[in-house]
């Protein structure tokens, strides 16, 4: 039986991945409240937004303000998604701690999402690395290889192409890489196999997993990734989110369900599940016209659960 890590980091991505996929535009003050309460619950990594044109995603137009607010919370790693060099330059200007660069292993999805081929995105990663180094910043560059388990546009995405893209991203200057099941096609067997192969190539630079619960397997896939040594997982409060350019890609792993599972497995997350559930209880009022997901919010904590909060986990900036 394989051993698991002793701890796991749950990075909240609802403020970006979640909100970009829904109609509601949440006020900046409400987003700041979300960040503050997630922080008070013990979360120490939050993706607060993305530097994309406001005309394309008005939901994320206040990302600079959110970075400034979040940086005022001690020990919080503030990350933003940047689709290109221009976005990276803005993120570096405001001092984000981590740049998350999407790289789709699906040629068709890459063109739909970024209007670039995967190799053109890889070239852009090299330019982002150069800009980061010239600026003297210590901001982490993390590349998420998306559609790693298949694509609703292209269909099959060969493992060899996923691993090639990952290696190319590292060669271009990424500090860390992760794998994402953008459309919820993965199962535990496929997750275990691909992450083991990726680990043999990237070593400790393989630092994150991102699963969608489209077909109800997100937590099972987390369990499989844990077996390969992954300690950081993206998740969204209420399971909101998806990819606007990947038809049928609904629902991220639910933050509250994921934290509950990890804690019940004996892994330290540093998160107070009751405080996180109290924050989750605000979402129906904040997003009244949106579909929310997650089992724990409906069923509640079991009476037999020894809910607890360990000290918040310190995140390492590589």
Image: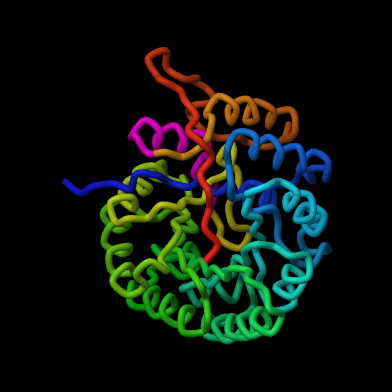
Q: Is residue 171 magenta?
A: no
- Residue at 32 percent of width and 67 percent of height: 199
- Could you tell me residue 128's position as x and y percent? 64, 80
Quadrant in which residue 127 is drawn: bottom right
278 with respect to 196 (left or right): right
- Could you tell me residue 223's position as x and y percent? 33, 45
- Residue at 37 percent of width and 15 percent of height: 304
- Could you tell me residue 160's position as x and y percent? 33, 77
Q: Is 236 rendered above or below residue 186?
A: above
- Residue at 74 percent of width and 46 percent of height: 23
Q: Is 46 rendered above or below residue 53?
A: above
Q: Nearer the viewer, residue 208 or 57?
A: 208
Q: Is 8 rendered above or below residue 186?
A: above
**Total residue callouts:** 0
Q: Nearer the viewer, residue 273 or 250?
A: 273
Q: Is 216 rendered above or below residue 308?
A: below
First to last magenta residue range: 249-267
- Residue at 63 percent of width and 36 percent of height: 291
- Could you tell me residue 197's position as x and y percent? 28, 69
70 with respect to 183 (left or right): right
Q: Nearer the viewer, residue 120 or 87?
A: 87
């Amino acid at each position: 039986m394989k051993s698991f890590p002793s701890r796991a980091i749950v990075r909240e991505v609802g403020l970006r991945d979640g909100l970009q996929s829904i109609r509601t535009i949440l006020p900046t003050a409400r987003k700041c409240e979300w960040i503050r309460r997630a922080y008070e619950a013990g979360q120490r990594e939050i993706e607060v937004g993305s530097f994309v044109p406001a005309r394309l995603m008005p939901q994320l137009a206040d990302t600079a303000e959110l970075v400034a607010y979040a940086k005022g919370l001690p020990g919080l790693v503030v990350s933003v998604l940047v689709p290109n060099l221009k976005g990276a330059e803005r993120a570096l200007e405001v001092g984000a701690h981590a740049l998350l660069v999407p790289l789709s292993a699906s040629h068709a999805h890459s063109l739909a999402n970024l209007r670039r081929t995967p190799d053109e995105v890889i070239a852009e990663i090299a330019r982002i690395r150069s800009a980061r180094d010239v600026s003297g910043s210590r901001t982490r560059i993390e590349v998420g290889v998306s559609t790693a388990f298949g694509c609703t546009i292209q269909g099959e995405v060969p493992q060899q192409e996923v691993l090639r893209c990952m290696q190319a991203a590292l060669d271009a200057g990424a500090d860390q890489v992760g794998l994402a099941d953008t459309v919820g096609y993965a199962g535990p067997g496929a997750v275990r196999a691909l992450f083991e192969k990726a680990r043999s190539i990237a070593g400790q630079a393989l630092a994150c997993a991102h699963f969608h619960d489209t077909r109800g397997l997100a937590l099972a896939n987390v369990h499989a990734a844990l077996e390969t040594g992954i300690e950081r997982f993206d998740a969204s409060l209420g399971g909101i989110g998806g990819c606007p350019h990947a038809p049928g890609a609904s629902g991220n792993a639910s933050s509250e369900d994921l934290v509950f599972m990890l804690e019940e497995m004996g892994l330290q997350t540093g998160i107070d599940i009751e405080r996180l559930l109290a924050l989750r209880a605000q979402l129906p009022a904040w997003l009244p016209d949106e579909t929310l997901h997650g089992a724990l919010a409906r069923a509640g904590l079991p009476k037999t659960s020894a809910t607890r909060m360990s000290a918040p986990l310190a995140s390492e900036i590589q």
